[in-house]
Image (spheres, rainbow, N blue to C red):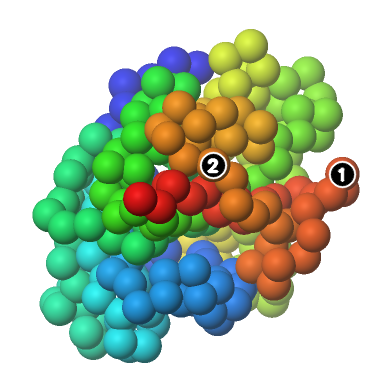
Amino acid sequence: MAHVFDPSAYGRSIADLYDVTVEGLPTGATVEQLHLLAGDGPVLEFGIGTGRLALPLAARGLQVSGIDGSPDMVEVLRSKPGGAAVRVVVGDFATTRVDGVFSLVALTTNTIFALPSQDAQVSCFRNAAAHLRPGGRFVVEAWVPDPAAFHRGASLRLLSLSEDVVVAEAARISPAEQLMATTKVRLTGEGIRLLPANHRYAWPAELDLMARLAGMEREHRWADWHRTPFGDDSRSHVSVYRLPPD
């Protein structure tokens, strides 16, 4: 299941319809919590994509910058009202630096798992810490791994069903390597689209250790953006890490 990592690959396959695929996400609640965590800002978003979060945050008066591996996703961001005013650097957010220090670095929507290895994810945490001012926060949103959902290393599930669109996902898992390859199949009256993605998944405790290696400590962990307490049955988490103040 090993692959050569290309930060731009995901955007090439999905940029033109990414906004449609995330319409059901709790964007309002996410923006509200990010704003509270950022205070007066500024904010840096790793994996800024098409600006789903960055543009509403900027509309609230925060200075927002971003890093994204996909020129195609950034092009969509630039085409939106206010998109041209957001500073974006195209590159691998595990290593790419931008000028300035920030009160908040955000990495949402499971994007930490797009990085191909534990080493890359550790580097990402260190890169986030390097961008934070003292007392600044790094927030990560991710799903909780569930290898038991797979039968003989594979799964097929229906994600959504309506009169106009059917979305299913086929997945293969390698527990020994903590790797997962997925392809979403999107069926509409216009045809079929295949949306592939690769994931190097990690458990919440592993992410906590990455934060400690980067000099940060966990401040909060919620099950969602409404600050629901995290527990045994939680299938996702929002984890907030903080750099010590001076």
Q: Are marks 1 and 2 in contact (CB under 8 Å)?
A: no
**In the image, residue 116 lies at what x, y percent?**
41, 27
**In the image, residue 62 lies at what x, y percent?**
31, 80
Disc 1 designates what residue?
A: 232
Disc 2 designates what residue?
A: 217
Mark 1 vs mark 2: in front? 2
Residue 165 in which image quadrant: bottom right
Residue 234 seen in the current view: yes
The kind of secondary structure element at disc 2 is strand
- 2 vs 130, left or right, is right
**In the image, residue 102 lies at what x, y percent?**
28, 60
Q: Nearer the viewer, residue 171 or 63?
A: 63
Please give the name of the residue rendered at 64% of the width and 55% of the height, measured from the top-left corner: 220
Residue 63 in which image quadrant: bottom left
Q: Nearer the viewer, residue 72 or 143?
A: 143
The kind of secondary structure element at disc 1 is loop
Q: Is residue 103 above or below residue 211?
A: below
Neighbour tally class for label 2: few under 14, some 14-19, many 20 plus, Cα within 10 Å: some
Residue 16 seen in the current view: no
Which is more N-terminal, label 2 or label 1?
Answer: 2
Amino acid type of the residue that numbered disc 2 sits on in the rendered structure = Glu
Neighbour tally class for label 1: few under 14, some 14-19, many 20 plus, Cα within 10 Å: few
Q: Nearer the viewer, residue 244 or 154?
A: 244
Please give the name of the residue rendered at 73% of the width and 57% of the height, measured from the top-left corner: 223
The residue furthest front is 246
How many numbered dots are placed on residues in this image?
2
Please give the name of the residue rendered at 44% of the width and 47% of the height, measured from the top-left corner: 244
**In the image, residue 114 lies at what x, y percent?**
44, 38
Marks 1 and 2, how far apart at CA: 22 Å
Amino acid type of the residue that numbered disc 1 sits on in the rendered structure = Asp
Residue 29: which disc?
Answer: none
Q: Is residue 159 above or below residue 3?
A: below
